[in-house]
């Protein structure tokens, strides 16, 4: 330690020595001798200890002053509550006393009234004792004595009640004195605590005076810290005080309960008072009636007395008169006088008699009065008895009142005792809690000392966390904004991708349509389907009925035929197995059928040997219709769908080719043969054929064909029926079937040896552009394709077979010529090819359904049919074209609009 000299003013002042510094540090005067190092250290230690003690004392003072404050508050509270309770008690007692006084006064006045009344009665009775019988007077005197006794007892009760009231007042005073004493004792304790407090302060002052030079900063901060820590303890103490308050509230509750009981007792007293009043009123009323009756009785008695006095006086007068008359003399005079006297005596006798009668009457009246008197006296005695009962009742009520007063006094006493007990208990509890709190406080101080480093550590971590938390929203905001940006970027990219996908999808859709159209156009060459019928009972049993046909699971265009141990593979555009339904078959031909609406010529053949299922595929059964009916239904549906922009007309003709002769199956004369002719304009036509639009079967049946052809290919006389619904179609089919059946002897045989044709023409006119399209759909159920050698026919059968073979081979030739792109296509070699010229040409769509019977015995024919299909399949017919009038494609197909026997008349 080194010190440099200080400059004070202009003079250098030497730096204080180490000893001086120590002295200053320890708070000694400069006059004190220098102290050694050892002394300094010991004094420093002592100073530290004293500081500690001072802190502790300060802390204690603080806690004590706090406690003192709390206790003072508690005491004040208790005092106020007690004062209030005392006030309430005093008031209630005063009210009670007042009530009792008023009651006593009332009773006294009643008694006085009674006494006066009794005295009056006694006086009145004494006045009448002369005429009354002696028994009555004794009775009245006994009743009055009783009344007097009752009054005396009431007075004694009153005196006892007054005594009780006085004792209660004395008790009240004692209680107030006791409360005052407790107040004084509490104030004394407060004063003691204040004294202790002041003493502690003085001690503190002493300590602080002994350490004047000591820096107060750190000590003050420590105490503050301790104070802060103890504030939490104070809170706990306050909670305990609230508990104490609760216990006090409990005592208050008890007090309230006693008050309630007191109130109920008061109500009972009130009720009894009312009852007493009622009884008193009744008593006074009865007394009044008695008085009235007594007065009446006295009047009557006095009247009777007066009358008896009057009578006795008259009697005496009469007697005197009689004696006077008897004493009179001489004879004449006496005679006269005797006569007179006799007369007078007679008169007097009569008078006497009347007087006696009168006296008798009076006696009877007197007797009556006596009896009335006795009755009245009995009534009076009864009334007196009643009075006695009332008096007894009043006694009982007063007894009850006294009991109740006693009970209330006892209860009040009990309540007071309870209250005192509760107060002492609360005091004891307070003391206990103070002790426990002191011990708790000590333990808390220890725990606080232990907790401080942990607390500082916690504060550190809290500050760190606070910093992190403060920074968290900013960080969160940053992250959220980043995520938002990323998500918006992702959404934008997704939406862009979606837009791209939509664009691509639209493009794909467009391309798909385009390619589909191109495919349909490419498929405009002859397409070949193969359909294998299921085995039927006609196939029989045995080795010849073995299945020789198999299919490829992966390729529905391949069919395998087991030809005597050698498996032959044939290709088709689609192979229908025996399990394939009519609907599945139609699904595949549907697009071809509907292309007829667009103005394409379509021809669908069913090719195959007899019994291979051609008719089943084309016509089907009633329950399971084939391509013919389904095609028409689909045409109706599609044309209806397009009906908003287009108006369509569907017409149909049904015909057959048998032995190279065309027959109109809708005609009235189906047997008549028809010819295909070319119109003068260069087309084929049937000379003499009437062309008319028919709308129903009836139209067909009734029509007269009169129109002459205007040119082009036509079948003269061919019936053309417009159909609008499936019902129309069924009717037309029925007519066709009927015509076919009537013309032949064996329908089955006939059907297998003739080609059945259903020609449907769909004419559409666009409502907006006035464009007209005409498409034809030819559905042909060919005759059986079996070879003549196999059938072994001769004569007519041979001719039939030859014609069939001819037409089928012609069909083959035409297809071959088309395949080889020969200049000449031999359409005219058979009626069938001639009729199907439009549908087999380069601008048409052709479908050949090759029917196969799957068993061993049909193997040869099946292989032949499949070979034919292979031949046909390889033919290239070129691109199909639409037949549109008023459009670009009209020129390409103009002049070929009339095919076979189908003549189309459009009424535009
Ligand atoms: N796919 C099939 N499912 C069920 N039965 C069928 C099927 N194909 C054909 N048949 C049945 O086979 C029998 C012969 O069929 P269908 O008469 O159609 O032969 P077809 O080739 O027309 O004979 P035809 O040349 O003599 O007229 C019929 O009883 C028919 O019901």
Image (tube, helix red, strand yellow):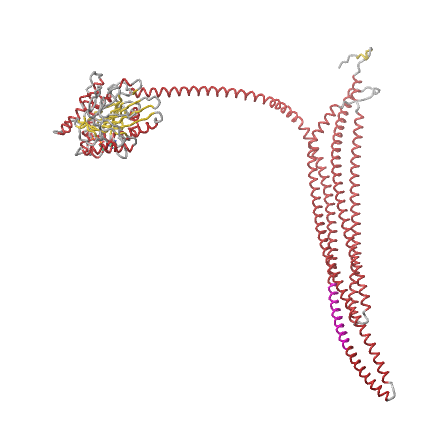
| Residue 442, quarter of picture | top right
Judge by depth and name the residue closer to the eye, 845 or 436: 845
161 to 652, vertically: above or below: below
Residue 569 in picture, x, y percent from top left: 24, 23
Residue found farthest to the bottom: 331
Q: Is residue 786 left or right of residue 445?
A: left
Specify whether residue 371 is painted magenta: yes
Quadrant in the rendering for residue 752: top left
Q: Quadrant of the N terminus?
A: top right
Position of the C terminus, as image quadrant, is: top left
Q: Of 779 and 57, which appears nearest the observer?
A: 779
Picture quadrant of residue 30: top right
Q: Is residue 403 left or right of residue 564?
A: right
Rendered position, 355 above or below 183:
below
Q: Going by the image, does 171 lie left or right of 236?
A: right
Rendered residue at 83%/85% (across/down):
340
Left or right: where 800 falls relative to 583: left
- Image quarter for ligand 1 equals top left
Question: Taking 125 as reference, is 57 above or below it?
Answer: above
Magenta-colored stretch includes residue 694? no
* Depth check, front residue: 25 or 308: 308
- Residue 319 is situated, as x and y percent measured from the top left of the image, at 84, 81
At which x and y percent is residue 504? 40, 19
Q: Which residues are magenta?
A: 360-388
Q: Is residue 541 visible?
A: no
Residue 414 appearing in the image: yes
Q: Nearer the viewer, residue 731 or 687?
A: 687
Q: Main secondary structure of the magenta part?
A: helix
Specify the farthest residue to the top. 10
Q: Position of residue 898 (x, y in %)?
A: 24, 23
């Amino acid at each position: 330690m080194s010190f440099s000299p200080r400059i004070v003013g202009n003079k250098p002042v030497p730096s204080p020595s180490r000893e001086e510094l120590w002295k200053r540090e320890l708070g000694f005067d400069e006059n004190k001798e220098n102290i050694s190092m050892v002394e300094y250290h010991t004094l420093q230690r002592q100073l530290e200890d004293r500081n500690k003690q001072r802190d502790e004392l300060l802390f204690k003072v603080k806690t004590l002053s706090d406690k003192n404050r709390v206790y003072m508050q508690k005491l004040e509270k208790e005092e106020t509550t007690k004062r209030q309770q005392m006030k309430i008690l005093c008031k209630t007692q005063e009210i009670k006393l007042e009530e009792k006084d008023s009651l006593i006064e009332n009773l006294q006045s009643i008694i006085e009234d009674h006494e006066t009344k009794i005295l009056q009665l006694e006086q009145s009775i004494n006045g009448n004792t002369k005429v009354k019988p002696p028994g009555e007077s004794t009775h009245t005197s006994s009743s009055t004595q009783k009344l007097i006794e009752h009054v005396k007892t009431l007075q004694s009760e009153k005196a006892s009640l007054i005594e009780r009231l006085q004792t209660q007042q004395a008790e009240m005073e004692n209680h107030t004195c006791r409360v005052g004493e407790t107040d004084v004792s509490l104030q004394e304790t407060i004063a003691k605590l204040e004294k202790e407090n002041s003493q502690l302060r003085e001690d503190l002052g002493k300590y602080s005076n002994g350490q004047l030079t000591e820096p107060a900063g750190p000590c003050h901060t420590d105490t503050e810290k301790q104070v802060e820590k103890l504030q939490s303890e104070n809170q706990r103490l306050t909670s305990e005080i609230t508990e104490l308050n609760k216990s006090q509230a409990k005592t208050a509750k008890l007090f309230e309960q006693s008050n309630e009981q007191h109130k109920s007792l008061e109500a009972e007293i009130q009720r009894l008072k009312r009852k007493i009043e009622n009884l008193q009123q009744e008593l006074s009323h009865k007394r009044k009636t008695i008085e009235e009756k007594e007065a009446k009785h006295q009047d009557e008695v006095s009247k009777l007395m007066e009358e008896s006095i009057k009578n006795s006086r008259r009697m005496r007068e009469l007697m005197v008169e009689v004696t006077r008359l008897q004493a009179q003399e001489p004879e004449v005079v006496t005679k006269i006088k005797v006569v007179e006297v006799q007369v007078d005596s007679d008169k007097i006798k009569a008078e006497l008699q009347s007087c006696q009668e009168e006296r008798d009457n009076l006696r009877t009246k007197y007797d009556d009065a006596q009896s009335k008197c006795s009755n009245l006296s009995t009534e009076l005695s009864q009334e007196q008895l009643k009075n006695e009962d009332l008096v007894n009742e009043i006694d009982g009520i007063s007894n009850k009142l006294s009991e109740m007063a006693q009970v209330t006094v006892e209860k009040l006493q009990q309540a007071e005792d309870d209250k005192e007990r509760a107060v002492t208990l609360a005091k004891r509890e307070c003391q206990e809690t103070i002790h426990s709190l002191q011990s708790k406080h000590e333990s808390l101080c220890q725990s606080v000392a232990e907790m401080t480093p942990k607390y500082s550590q916690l504060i550190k971590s809290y500050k760190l966390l606070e910093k992190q938390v403060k920074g968290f929203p900013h960080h969160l905001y940053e992250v959220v904004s980043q995520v938002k940006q990323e998500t918006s970027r992702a959404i934008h990219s997704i939406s862009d991708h979606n837009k791209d996908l939509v664009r691509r999808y639209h493009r794909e859709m467009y391309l798909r349509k385009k390619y589909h159209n191109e495919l349909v156009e490419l498929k405009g060459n002859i397409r070949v389907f193969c359909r294998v019928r299921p085995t039927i009972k006609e196939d029989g049993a045995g080795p010849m009925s073995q299945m020789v046909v198999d299919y490829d699971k992966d390729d529905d265009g391949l069919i395998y035929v087991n030809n005597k141990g050698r498996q032959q593979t044939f290709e088709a555009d689609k192979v229908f197995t025996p399990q394939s339904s009519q609907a599945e078959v139609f699904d595949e031909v549907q697009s071809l059928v509907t292309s007829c609406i667009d103005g394409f010529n379509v021809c669908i053949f069913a090719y195959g040997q007899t019994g291979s299922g051609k008719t089943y595929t084309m016509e089907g059964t009633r329950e399971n219709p084939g391509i013919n009916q389904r095609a028409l239904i689909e045409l109706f549906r599609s044309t209806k769908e397009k009906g908003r922009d287009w108006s369509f007309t569907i017409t149909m003709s049904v015909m057959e080719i048998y032995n190279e002769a065309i027959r109109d199956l809708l005609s009235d004369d189906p047997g008549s043969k028809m010819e295909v002719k070319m119109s003068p304009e260069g087309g084929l036509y049937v000379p003499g054929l009437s062309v008319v639009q028919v709308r129903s079967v009836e139209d067909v049946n009734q029509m007269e064909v009169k129109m002459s052809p205007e040119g082009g290919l036509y079948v003269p006389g061919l019936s053309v029926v417009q159909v609008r619904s499936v019902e129309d179609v069924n009717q037309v089919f029925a007519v066709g079937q009927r015509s076919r059946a009537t013309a032949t002897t064996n329908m089955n045989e006939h059907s297998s040896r003739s080609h059945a044709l259903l020609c449907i023409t769909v004419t559409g006119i666009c409502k907006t552009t006035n464009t007209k399209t005409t498409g034809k759909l030819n559905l042909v159920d060919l005759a059986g394709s079996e070879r003549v050698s196999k059938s072994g026919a001769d004569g007519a059968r041979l001719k039939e077979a030859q014609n069939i073979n001819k037409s089928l081979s012609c069909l083959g030739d035409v297809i071959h010529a088309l395949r080889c792109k020969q200049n000449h296509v031999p359409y005219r070699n058979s009626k069938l090819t001639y009729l199907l010229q439009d549908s087999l040409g380069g601008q048409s769509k052709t479908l050949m359904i090759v029917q196969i019977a799957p068993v061993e015995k049909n193997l040869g024919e099946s292989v032949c049919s499949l070979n034919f299909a292979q031949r046909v399949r390889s033919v290239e017919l070129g691109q199909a074209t639409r037949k549109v009038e008023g459009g670009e494609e009209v020129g390409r197909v103009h002049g070929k609009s009339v095919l076979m026997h189908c003549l189309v008349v459009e009424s535009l």
